[in-house]
Image (cartoon, coloured by chain):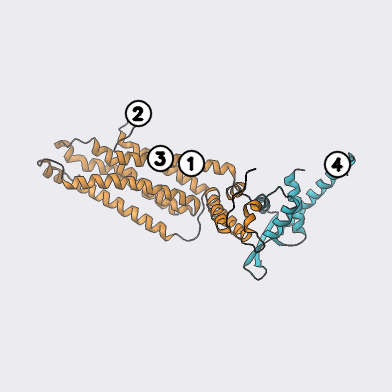
């Protein structure tokens, strides 16, 4: 798995936990991957939307103006399962080499 | 890695908007700008860390760019902009520096139009996007270029009238009508060639219908260039004086008609 796939896995996993607006998605991912800038994560998020793995809708947010909320589509859920499976295989392979 | 330059939220958004409008189709660009506006103006956002967290605005735009389409656009823009530069230079100087074939050089401006019109229409019909209602600025610009073109051609019609030329042939010197026509066609043609460039840029960045400004201004500049080259090589002998008006207008009316059709297509 490449770093991009790991980012995608984490992003889809975040959205599987509930609909989130942009800043809510980008901030935890930047914290987890400090050498990745938010613009790269946003580009990934946008790419997922183009592939119909996520959708968005506008909704009121925190008393301020409407925010764009992102949600997972069924195709996104399937992609998440696929990435989870890949991750488990990779993790098991690494552990088999004695890496803890 | 060098120290990142700090930008205010407004500066960041402005720089990002310019970069993204140049690289992405208009609707996609507006979406990205709207998303970045939301991200940048978050209450929790620390302005002093904006570039550090989000990355350089141009780099952020680059990440959203379809590189293949963008490179195609740069090539198309380079060809169209070079054509306009040559047209402006020829209209202003009254001659071409190129002698590429045995064709008379007054056709050179028409060659630029023959390449620029189909290429730009093809590219923008395929990759450009409409964006909202027709802009008043566009209508005003089209009206201005059209009015300028009509005035120049009407004056050219007047000064190439055989009766007018015969009347002044007996006098020494150049009548003021001809001097005015030379100024109108030289500066008007150059201005039209230059006005076509913003049409091209605005068609890419905001709404593809701005291409109509490019096509109309290109047509006007090409017609002016055609007439300038003919006037430069004209010998006002009796035989020429009787047929120059018919000769010029039999050629520039079809050029203008093609340009108007192209302008209509660009607006649709």
The C terminus of chain A - image quarter: top right
> Measuring 26% from the left and 38% from the top, which residue is drawn there?
B230
> SS class of the residue under badge 4?
helix
Q: Where is mark 4, residue-wise?
A: A94
Q: Are marks 1 and 3 on the same chain?
A: yes
Q: Are marks 2 and 1 in contact (CB under 8 Å)?
A: no
**Chain ID, orange in image:** B
> SS class of the residue under badge 3?
helix
Q: Nearer the viewer, mark 3 or mark 2?
A: 3
> Callout 3: few (<14), some (14-19), or many (20+) C-alpha neighbours within 10 Å?
many
Q: Nearer the viewer, residue B132 or A2?
A: A2
**Can residue B53 be seen by looking at this rendering?**
yes
Q: Where is mark 3, residue-wise?
A: B83
> Measuring 57% from the left and 48% from the top, which residue is drawn there?
B58
Q: Where is mark 2, residue-wise?
A: B101
Instruction: Give how far apart the Cα atoms at labels 4 and 3 are.
Output: 60 Å
> SS class of the residue under badge 2?
loop
Q: Nearer the viewer, mark 2 or mark 4?
A: 4
Instruction: Give how far apart the Cα atoms at labels 2 and 1 are.
Output: 25 Å
Which label is found at residue B76?
Answer: 1
The chain letter for the residue carrying disc 1 is: B
| Residue B266 located left or right of residue B253 | right
The N terminus of chain A - image quarter: top right
Q: Position of residue B96 (x, y in %)?
A: 32, 34
Q: Are marks 2 and 4 in contact (CB under 8 Å)?
A: no
Q: Earlier in the sequence, mark 2 or mark 1?
A: 1
> Chain A is which colour?
cyan
Q: Earlier in the sequence, mark 1 or mark 3?
A: 1
């Amino acid at each position: 798995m490449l770093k991009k796939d790991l980012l995608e896995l984490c992003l889809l996993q975040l959205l599987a936990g509930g609909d989130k607006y942009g800043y809510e998605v980008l901030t935890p991912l930047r914290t987890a991957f400090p050498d990745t800038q938010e613009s790269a994560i946003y580009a990934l998020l946008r790419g997922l939307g183009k592939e119909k793995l996520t959708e968005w809708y506008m909704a009121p947010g925190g008393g301020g103006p409407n925010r764009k909320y992102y949600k997972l589509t069924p195709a996104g859920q399937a992609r998440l399962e696929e990435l989870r499976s890949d991750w488990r295989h990779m993790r098991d392979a690494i552990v088999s080499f004695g890496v803890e | 890695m060098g120290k990142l330059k700090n930008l205010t939220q407004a500066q960041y958004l402005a720089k990002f908007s310019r970069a993204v409008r140049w690289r992405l189709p208009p609707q996609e660009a507006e979406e990205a700008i709207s998303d970045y506006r939301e991200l940048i103006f978050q209450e929790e956002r620390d302005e002093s860390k904006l570039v550090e967290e989000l990355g350089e605005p141009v780099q952020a735009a680059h990440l959203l760019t379809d590189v293949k389409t963008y490179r195609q656009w740069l090539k198309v823009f380079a060809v169209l902009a070079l054509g306009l530069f040559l047209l402006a230079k020829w209209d202003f100087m009254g001659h071409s520096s190129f002698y590429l074939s045995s064709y008379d050089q007054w056709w050179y401006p028409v060659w630029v139009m023959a390449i620029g019109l189909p290429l730009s229409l093809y590219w923008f019909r395929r990759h450009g996007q409409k964006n909202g209602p027709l802009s008043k600025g566009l209508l005003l610009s089209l009206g201005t270029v059209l009015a300028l073109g009509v005035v120049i051609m009407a004056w050219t019609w007047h000064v190439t009238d055989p009766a007018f030329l015969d009347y002044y042939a007996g006098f020494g010197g150049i009548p003021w009508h001809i001097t005015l026509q030379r100024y109108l066609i030289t500066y008007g043609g150059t201005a039209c060639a230059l006005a076509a460039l913003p049409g091209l840029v605005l068609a890419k960045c905001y709404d593809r219908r701005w291409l109509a400004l490019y096509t109309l201004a290109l047509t006007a500049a090409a017609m002016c260039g055609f007439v300038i080259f003919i006037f430069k090589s004209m010998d006002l002998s009796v035989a020429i004086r009787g047929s120059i008006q018919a000769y010029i207008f039999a050629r520039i009316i079809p050029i203008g008609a093609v340009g108007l059709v192209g302008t209509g297509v660009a607006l649709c």
